[in-house]
Image: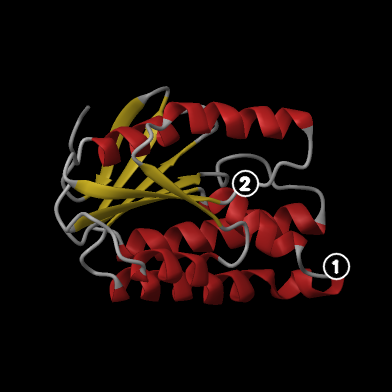
Amino acid sequence: MSGGSVRLLLGGVRAGKSGRAVALAEAQSDAALFFVATAQAFDDEMQQRIANHQAERSARWRTIEAPVSIVPAIDEALSAPHLFARRVVVIDCLTLWVSNLLLARADDELRDAEPYVAREVAALVTCMQHHADVQWVVVSNEVGLGIVPHTLLGRAYRDALGRANQLVAAAAGTVELMVAGIVLPLKGPSERH
């Protein structure tokens, strides 16, 4: 990974995206590591999932919990003094962030979900461009390959996440699809680990 880069890791559930994101960041031995966590622990099972992800990360990480207000949280963390000249930010994941954004809206606002999420993601892309010296690894699920959801919320979510993935992919220098732990390069150079 080079300085000031954006890498998007796409794939299905349990495809290896989060593990790859952490490994790519931890390979940067001379960098401060930031993990932007978007998950919320609403039940015991989700608490366990979060705990498992936390256990995968070394003590080098600073966790930024930002289930909805991601840009201000990142800006604040990156403006604080740190000991390293280089910084790596892992955002894990767009999937839950978009879900959180939609769940914070009223049912009658779901018809405008895609443009709303697109504006939020555009603000994130602007944040990444503003912090151009940072190495970014963004994790997201690819949910557009399945059946059409039968509910308005399901369709709004699928469409909004698809748009979010497109916007981040356009800003990324590297986009990879993870399938069964295997990296499939889609855009830009790829490092196989």
Image height of 23 relative to 85, above or below: above
Type of amino acid under label 1: Asp
Q: Which residue is the extreme one toward the right?
A: 107
- According to the picture, the residue beneath numbered tag 1 turns out to be 107
Regarding residue 16, the answer to whether it shows in the image is no
x, y percent for residue 37? 53, 49
Which residue shows up at 14% across the image and 52% down it? 2
Q: Quadrant of the C terminus?
A: top left
- Tell me the SS state at disc 1: helix
Which residue shows up at 42% across the image and 35% down it? 17
x, y percent for residue 80? 36, 67
Regarding residue 191, the answer to whether it shows in the image is yes
Give the camera-side residue of 144 and 34. Answer: 34
Q: Residue 77 carries which label?
A: none
Query: How many C-alpha atoms fall within 10 Å of the one at disc 2: few (<14), some, or many (≥20)?
Result: many
Query: How many C-alpha atoms fall within 10 Å of the one at disc 1: few (<14), some, or many (≥20)?
Result: few
Which residue shows up at 67% across the image and 63% down it? 101
Which quadrant holds residue 81?
bottom left
- Tell me the SS state at disc 2: loop
Which quadrant holds residue 74?
bottom left
- According to the picture, the residue beneath numbered tag 2 turns out to be 39
